[in-house]
Image (cartoon, helix red, strand yellow):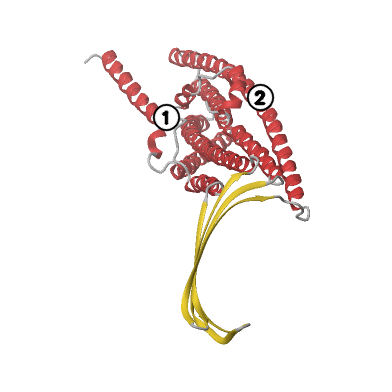
Amino acid sequence: MRADVLLLYIVFAFSFLNGTAFAQCRIVEPVQPNERDQLAVEIAAQDLNLVRSRARPTLQSQASIGYLEQNSRFGIIDPSNLSGEVASLSLNARAPLYQFGALRSNIRSAVSGLEEASENNLIALMERQANLARSKLAYVYAENIYDIRLAQLQLTKAGVERAEIQFQRGLLSEAALMQKQVEVREDTLREGLAQLNIETTFRELSHLSPNRPHDCSNLPLSALSVQVQLLPSLDQLLKGIKFNSPELRSLKAALRASEYKTKFHKRSRLPALSAEVNAFLNEGPVNFGPFNDRINLSSVEAKLVLSVPLYDGGHLSAEVGKAQAEEQLARLKVLRRERGMRDTVERLHSSLLIHRRKIELLKETLLTVKRLSSIAEKQVELGEASKTDLDQSALEALQAEETLLEAQRDYISIYIDLMEIVEL
């Protein structure tokens, strides 16, 4: 097989494997909801059920049994001893009819509370999603930096070997040799720190994504950078704040809950109309002269009840004042957060555009430095330059690659910050 054909197969295989890793390691991927957040939503749902139950009819029953012993004197009736077992049974049915919208306002306040809890659950999901993305970014960046540190160490070691030969031949001073040896120790330390950083970031990624932490191994940072290149326009982002920001939707739901709560307390001061049906059944002893038997007494009562709060010591007024203050605070939070989010989105969007342009320039710089390194390699072959010049050119290429990696990392990090505010 010809060498160029073999090289083509190698490039194709590398591209396929890299593409497979790219497909598996997504910078943004769904995460599982937290049990605590789900419980918060469940609590809000049960609060809503509790409030709704107050608008439904209620039915109560009460039964009692005992013993009665009493001496009574009834005029012409001879004194007698009324004694024996007594029993009673009562049923009470009550249904609220009209409360001037108080119950409806209370239900809507609970509905808004459930919406707020659901949005807070989504906020927590997006936060964990962003933390997972940051962990992936840190791990991939650490691996890429380690490759650069290892290449730098190999170059400095090769430089020390040539320096030792030159020192033995008397072409290099001892101070210059010692300087080269110090550079090796420094690069060895950087390589060790880079390896430690890989282990640290991998543990963090394994904690956040325990099932597939190896999906992002041996992946160029540019693969993650490609995933975040499609950036919406600033107008789309600003318009999307109102609809695609769970945090803002949560604050607005809290505002609606406060508004309905204020209405509820205000309308609680108005009359309330309800219907009641009471049924009684009593059984007990009787002994009046010639009669000596037990009697059964039963009655049914149906009525409309109109309750009017007259004076409660200022309790309702205090509740209304507190609800109004909470409503004003919730409205102020919405206005301030919306303004702050607009400023943050504008700043992040501008920073992304700057970093995108910076990455393009650094890519051109890296290509230029690599061309110079190729030229230096040819000059070494022709004897027009030394291997020290070639190593210096290679180090400059590695430095340019590291600068590009830092810019790509910053770009992705800013994108994650933006993703945490607005659903992208």
* Image x and y of residue 390, in percent: 49, 20
* Circle 1 residues within 10 Å: few <14, some 14–19, many ≥20: many
Given the image, on which type of amino acid does mark 1 rest? Leu
Q: In the rendered structure, which disc, 1 or 2, sits on the residue that comes first in sequence?
A: 1
Picture residue at 74% right of the left edge, 38% below the top: 328
Q: Is residue 259 left or right of residue 83?
A: right
Given the image, on which type of amino acid does mark 2 rest? Arg
Give the position of the N terminus as an image quadrant.
top left
| Helix, strand or loop for disc 1 | loop
389 vs 177: above or below: above
79 vs 371: above or below: below
* Image x and y of residue 88, in percent: 50, 70
Farthest left residue in view: 1
Picture residue at 73% right of the left edge, 48% below the top: 319
Q: Which residue is identified by label 1? A: 219
Visible residue check, residue 64: no
